[in-house]
Amino acid sequence: MSSTVLSPSAKASPSSPEGERKTFLNADYGWKSWLFTVDHKRIAVLYLISIMVFFLIGGTFALLMRAELLTAKGDLFEAETYNKLFTMHGVVMIFFFLVPSIPAVLGNFLVPIMVGTKDLAFPKINLLSWYIYIVGGAATLFVAITGGIDTGWTFYAPYSSTYANTNVAGTAVAVFITGFSSILTGLNFIVTIHKMRAPGMTWFRMPLFLWAQYATSLIMVLGTPVLAITIVLLGLERVFHIGIFDPALGGDPVLFQHLFWFYSHPAVYIMILPGMGVISEIIACFSKKRMFGYHFIAFSSLAIAIFGFVVWGHHMFVSGQSAYASFVFSFLTMLVAIPSAVKVFNWTATLYKGQVSLETPMLYALGFIGLFTIGGLTGVFLAVMGLDRHVHDTYFVVAHFHYVMVGGMVMAFMGGMHFWWSKMFGRKYPEWIAQFSSVVVFVGFNFTFFPQFLLGYMGMPRRYHQYNAEFEVLNVLSSAGASILGTGFLMTICYFIWSLKWGQVAERNPWGAKGLEWERAPSPPPTFNFEDGERIVVTEDAYAYTHEEPHGGSLQEARK
């Protein structure tokens, strides 16, 4: 995607020495300049730091669970403590890592640059969304420190609304507060993409990352208030015992499930849709081809967002839901696999006869395609009512969810961070270590979660700290895989931090990629994204690769 530069003076700035150029990182100094910033790029960095803290906390809970499951006897923690561990793991990882990570970090950083503007539509609201996120996260950590919660991250009533003795109210308040962060972020993205695109950037010249963020934002704005209402109702019943969900008081526990899953299944696509946008950018760049079926991928993002709101009932096949309603939800759940499959087929077609280059981002993208495909296909298994009855609430569901979330969203997040790291911070990471780490993460992930498909099919229920002895070998394998997976993640964090000081200084476009963030914004960008006096006018379609270009430049330049 090219642009027209209307000011000759803007061309001279990038040639000045790196140390003399002002960037968003060194525009001003002191902690106050960061905590009160309205620069979308700095807010993205604040989110990145915060989210990684919660990722490490949630991962610690997971490793403690896997340590307990090394033996069948349940000899490390009491049952109540184990219940708190898996609950806090779910709450922290879903609401404070998986949901916000790509929109809040990569979306915040890239959306204004990709549309060719200097900031999001509402910069102060953007900063407010981070503060809301921090307040919600601090409240959640306070709950963990002061005793935790044992309801599971789904907060199923009437146990959570009436009978649980743990800190349900504090966790509910934390999740309720955090929801406003998602709503504000989604609103900001929608307005920015609608109203602030550079001249010449029509809807069908936008990068597919923007289409994915737009679809995700619709779910954030429309779905999150339903969760907020559900949490309020749960709190009212817990405090005033007014009989909304508790059948002993005249309430209906299935109503809670309808309300909760009406948000929480679309929330799966809040987590995965942005990752699909990341993968589209990486596949096109490292294939050096126009994205095959661009329009189909763009519309499939919207289709996934729409279908996500009509399939919540497949979580309730064993809850007493009508068999006729279950049949409808089963059919709709199978349909939602179609737009996801469209993306996978088009990514594969883009790779076909492309000049594929296997740098670290591409390794994560290929891992995403394989793991997400397994996760998606096993989701179709769970849409079949007969099979779902057999594996419901077993480790099969745990494995499916993690193949979609960790195998999908986390792999995409890792790929995106490696792809745009040099653009964000102006430094390169050590490529060979990053490639090795990506392989470690891929191997560790499969060792961790593939055995859980077998465990679930054999009948091992989830959320138990004791289990039958015949399941022990597969659990040992899964726990060993978790150690490998954790090692891969820690390696990545370490060399990213190392690169900030000692990494090689990055040029503007190290990948030879298309897009305004690569072709017009320096690495790292200045405060207002582009050089002073530069006005962006888009003159090409997205992904305008000539296909004759080898990695990093034109064929003629390579021969010279």
Image (cartoon, helix red, strand yellow):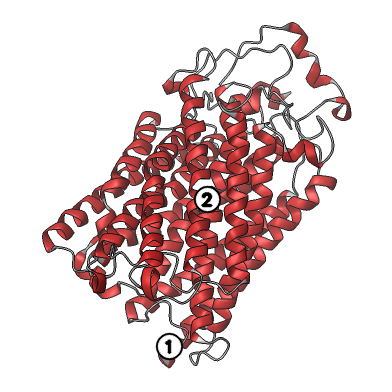
In this picture, residue 395 sits left or right of residue 540: left
Kind of element beneath mark 1: loop
Residue 368, numbered label: none
**Residue indicated by mark 1:** 467
Q: Is residue 264 above or below residue 284?
A: below
Badge 2: how crowded within 10 Å, few (<14), some, or many (20+)?
many
Residue lying at 55% horizontally and 32% vertically, measured from the top left = 288
The three-letter amino acid code for the residue at tag 2 is: Thr
Q: Callout 1: 10 Å neighbours few (<14), some, many (20+)?
A: some
x, y percentage for residue 305?
A: 35, 41
Check the picture and name the quadrant holding the C terminus. Answer: top right
For the residues labelled 1 and 2, the Cα–Cα distance comes to 35 Å
Horizontal and vertical percent for residue 411? 54, 53
Q: Which residue is mark 2?
A: 178
Question: Residue 420 location in percent, x, y?
Answer: 64, 39
Q: Amino acid at mark 1?
A: Tyr
Q: Earlier in the sequence, mark 1 or mark 2?
A: 2
Q: Is residue 372 left or right of residue 322?
A: right
